[in-house]
Image (cartoon, rainbow, N blue to C red):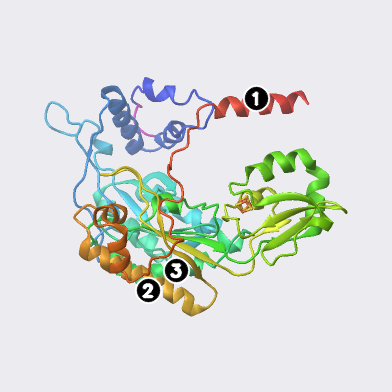
Amino acid sequence: MAKQPHATPLLDQLESGPWPSFVTGLKRLAKDKDYVVDLLGHLEHSYKTRKGYWKGGTVGVLGYGGGVIPRFTEIKDEKGEPKFKDAAEFHTLRIMPAPGMHYDTETLRKFCDIWEKYGSGLIALHGQTGDIMLQGCTTENVQPAWDEINQMGFDMGGAGPSVRTGMSCVGAARCEQSCYDEAKAHQMVVNRFLDDIHRPALPYKFKFKFSGCGNDCMNAIQRSDMAIIGTWRDNMKTDDALGKKWFAKHGMNELINDIVSMCPTRALQVKETKDVRKDAHISAVALNDSQSLEVDNKDCVRCMHCINVMTGALGPGKDKGATILVGGHGHLKIGATLGTVIVPFMSLKQEEDYEKLVELGQTIIDFFAENALEHERTGEMIERIGLANFLEGIDVDVDANMVNCPRSNPYVNTGGWDEEVARINAKKAAA
Ligand code: SF4
């Protein structure tokens, strides 16, 4: 039984909305832990005064230069002692996940047990950088907690000016759109840059993210210095039986409104099967015995929309690989930037293809280490020195397919989404 809870009227309000609240989770943990009781008090004080009160410091584990994010409270009482003394230290351990974030339940239970023993019990799967975030630990408990996690076979993630923990999507293991072996690419890159992950020595952070297709489930284009996004360069794969099944269920209206008219490059047309063009860059999927959906693969920009809607009937081609982009990041000195294509297509089939990818990463990181200013991301460095100089520096020839900012704005306006969901639910309920 923990100590008496603090009054938290502002935090309580967060529990009143329609979504599950982290406050409810914290209150559950607070029933047994003084640590979390004071954490709630600390947070309420922050909300009341509209200020953050955590300052950094130096906390680490033996043999590593990074991976622990230290946090010490700045809220003091009249005597200069921490006001919420049980939560005066609230460090976070960043742990590298397995590629594709695959876990079994035994592993997850072990994490929970270790963190209940040494920390607050609060775990975030996963942080923005992809790490398993074990949040809330005293300085004294950091090393023993880490020792047990390390014995499970996990390693510390990156923090500070270093190569950061990589992220890869669930990939070929569970997704039919996958265009390369994401887990393999991720693992090979991590193994090469392990030293740069654990010992921060770069001008600033450097992130790798691996998405298996243009859906970019890892938001690699927006959030990584080097994005490896799966794609293909031959014709789309088609399946007539699945095309007919889809059409019988959804019909012409849906096909025209939700697929054909949404294609950003107008690469799709509905045709009488006898009129489908016979050119090498044309593929077609049957809709019924007389009509087909024709795809002009020369115009297709591999945006994935039609494939997402007609999965199986349409699919990525056979000649698969990845597009490599460099320079994406959230807002900093020059605002948010999206990655710029520097390799339009890299085949990723053989072992040596993957080695080539790792070598490219090494070249880019070496150039970044030597040429970036302190606290400058790759995107900002490229903006400052010019794309042509960057390409010359990494010895990559200019290509017309190097699209600068394939999309221009990483933010999505979600205004009206809740109303739309309510409208759809009401329509479903009435039906
Ligand atoms: Fe058009 Fe290609 Fe996107 Fe399909 S994947 S909607 S054909 S651009």
Q: Residue at x 47, y 56 (%)?
A: 110
Q: Is most of the magenta stretch helix, strand or loop? A: loop
CA–CA distance in space, label 1 to label 3: 44 Å
Q: Which residue is mark 1?
A: 423
Is 137 situated above or below 78? below
Q: Which residue is mark 2?
A: 359
Q: Residue at x 31, y 62 (%)?
A: 388
Q: Which residue is mark 3?
A: 187
Q: Is residue 159 left or right of residue 265?
A: left
Frontmost of labels 2 and 1 is 2
View extreme (right): residue: 289
Q: Secondary structure at mark 3?
A: helix
Q: Residue at x 46, y 35 (%)?
A: 25
CA–CA distance in space, label 2 to label 1: 51 Å
Question: Amino acid under label 1?
Answer: Arg
Q: Is residue 261 left or right of residue 320?
A: right
